[in-house]
Image (spheres, rainbow, N blue to C red):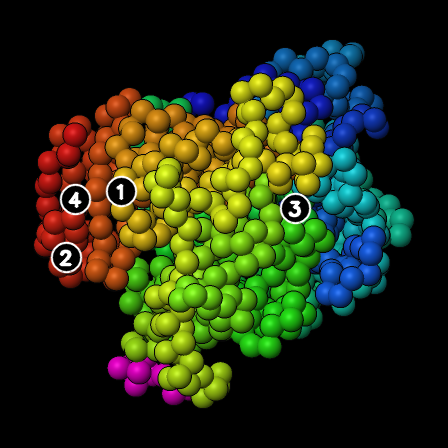
Amino acid sequence: MSSQWVYEIKGLDLDNPACLVNETIFHNANGYIGVRSNFEEGYPQDYDTIRGSYINGFYDIAKMPQAEKLCGLVEEKQTMLNVADTQTIQLEINGEVFSMFRGTVEESSRSLDMARGITCRRVVWTSPLGHKINLTVRRMASFKLKPLFTIEYQVEPVNFSGDTRLVSGHNGDVRNYCNPNDPRVAGESFVHLKGRTARIPGQGESLIVMDTVSSGLSVCTYVKNVCSMPVQMSREAKGYSISWNIHAKVEQGQTFTLTKYTVFTDSLRYRDCEDAACKAMEEALSVPLIRWYDWQKEYLDVFWNQSALDIEGDDDLALAVRYNLYQLIQSAGRDKYGNIAAKGLSGEGYEGHYFWDTEMYMQPFFTLTNPDISRNLIDYRYEILDGARENARILGHKKGALYPWRTISGKECSGYFPSGSAQYHINGDIAYAVVAYYLATLDLGYIAEKGAEIVFETARLWMDTGNFYKGRFLINDVTGPDEYTCIVNNNYYTNACAQYNLHWAVRFWELLNQAGLLEPVAKKLELTREEILEFSRAEKAMYLPYDEELGINPQDDSFLQKKKWDIANTPKDHFPLLLHYHPLYIYRFQVCKQADTVLAHFIFEDAQDLETIRRSFAYYETVTTHDSSLSTCIYSIVASKLGEKEKAYTYFGDSAKLDLFNLHHNTKDGIHTANMGGNYMAVVYGFGGLRLKESGLHFAPYLPGPWKAYTFKVCYRGRTIKVRVDEEKTVFVLESGERVSLWIYDEPCLLENVLEIPVKK
């Protein structure tokens, strides 16, 4: 790790698992497209690789037959597609083919420059006959022109002059990766794309249009090869695969550069994706590549100025945190057609599906730093609201909306309903994100336009799912965040989510009514004051399980009745448990895959007193495996709240380096975007003690022992606030906007310019 802005690895391990991980770590994406960082020249035939290029929200439909044809079970799913391979560049020098697996690799490195938004691969290679070359490859997925992906491929002969031959490939006939032994990726490989058009628009160019087999979508990829010196070109075409043979005479010490432009367009966003691709390519070629590099840096200058989280005193950790934030901006959709997949745009894990992860782990980062992107993410949920209504009807509910547990276009894609469709808390999670956006922006106009409709319709669902019994409102037969405990009564987290959802449905009714903005949405939904009063009644009567003997909140009604799983004596190679034990066996134990009640104690901390939270935290620590990447960051935040600083820091460190060190052994399938968002929260919500509440913006900062200081920024109601915490004090700086009231250690403070507050030890 050479600096806080560049992540670099040298002396590449050519072992298969290591290469697969690096394909993920160094991928290029911009929220619309993502391209894995495969070797351009390819691999040996028996080598396992996940060679992929993806478009956010672009999918086909695959059959998912159920063993038993029960009512409402999902029989098909959407799956994100590998849309084309335009990475291929094969190199031959004086008749010898370049490969990392033959000859001598004298030097090798890969790097990601997060200030410039470019990845770089450098190789010094000597062929079996002694020809030595310097190879430099730079890649970029443009933040300014979203369809654009570039490869700048530079070859320098070191000790010879002679023939240099490149074969630049463009293949539309591709398939997705599959692994039948891992439930986190697709188990079968299907043909999802069929060819429509393959043509040569001009010298060094290729254009391919493919149609999906089932979803009725189309994708166009357009490639242009531009060379730095005169060359001879010839083409080869077979079906929907086109390649250009490029021949050049290169002198010793001279650098020959092939710049390969690719644009990706799809029929979701463009009426005519082929025409859109042609226009995008024209724009891409209208300026030199260096200008696109400049625009990339300008975009990231703005992003980092708003979003940078700087750590002083641990450069490696600072770099890891910055890497995580960079992956979030690479992964986040910018329009109503895409969201943030569980693996971003870096791989095919979870088939490109969107989960609750977006709202509870990733969106908080954008809400606090880039509220426009946060609003875009809500736009997507609003776009699929009709699908959520339909999903509710499939599950028997006559009113309201139930968001699918995993989806791309709005239909449920979870084949195993006990740990999928039964996770009704996703409704509360999405409502929570809408509320957080409102609290950070006070954008009541957007709430009137879209946000309130989401909150009202999700609140309606709770009224039909739950019921009043002996003065309490109960919610039975659901699954909480912990997927090792399924189909339970009164999951604490779910009930707390529902309570918050109902509360804000009532509150938005009041706020919109006061502002004269209520009538359109109330009329559209036929929502009455009587229904709102029922929401309020259910909120106040919501049952939140509590055990008098232990003084904790049980995860659900039956959790404490089960025997505890012996985590300490479980073989290390039997984790994660889901890959080694039958689900029913796991369900009969007190064992948690991830934070569940502990997550509720972070998100809905005001629902319980501090000592109950403390006892609950200590109890659930003993039964949680952290098999999910969503877990340790939450434990870090709650440990911070409880003043357990060493424990908070340990949990944070496990979270920060999860992908860079492949701690869960599945980074090959893609990054863990939710953990990356949770890692940000562990600093800002954990160490910084930040909370967004209707009463205002709250802070309770402290400095983790190993650090000298840390700094972050918050966009809050039209202001930009910079916060720097060191051992002695916290300095709040109002960088833009009008003065604002803050709560610091539960005391009201007025920030007009600069405010210094001593750090509580």
- Residue range in magenta is 512-520
Which residue is at 67% across, 30% downward? 20
Q: Is residue 9 above or below residue 616?
A: above
Q: Earlier in the sequence, mark 1 or mark 2?
A: 1
**Could you tell me the amino acid type at mark 2?**
Ser
Q: What element does badge 4 sit on?
A: loop
**Could you tell me the amino acid type at mark 1?**
Leu
Query: Marks 3/4: CA distance?
Result: 41 Å
Viewed as shown, does residue 636 lie left or right of 270?
left
Q: Earlier in the sequence, mark 2 or mark 3?
A: 3
**Could you tell me the amino acid type at mark 3?**
Tyr
Which residue is at 31% across, 83% downward? 513
Q: Label 2: which residue?
A: 741
Q: Position of residue 502 (x, y in %)?
A: 40, 68
Q: Tell me if mark 1 has few (under 14), some (14-19) or many (20+) residues whose alpha carbon lies within 10 angstroms of its own.
A: some
Q: What element does badge 2 sit on?
A: strand
Q: Position of residue 577 (x, y in %)?
A: 63, 32
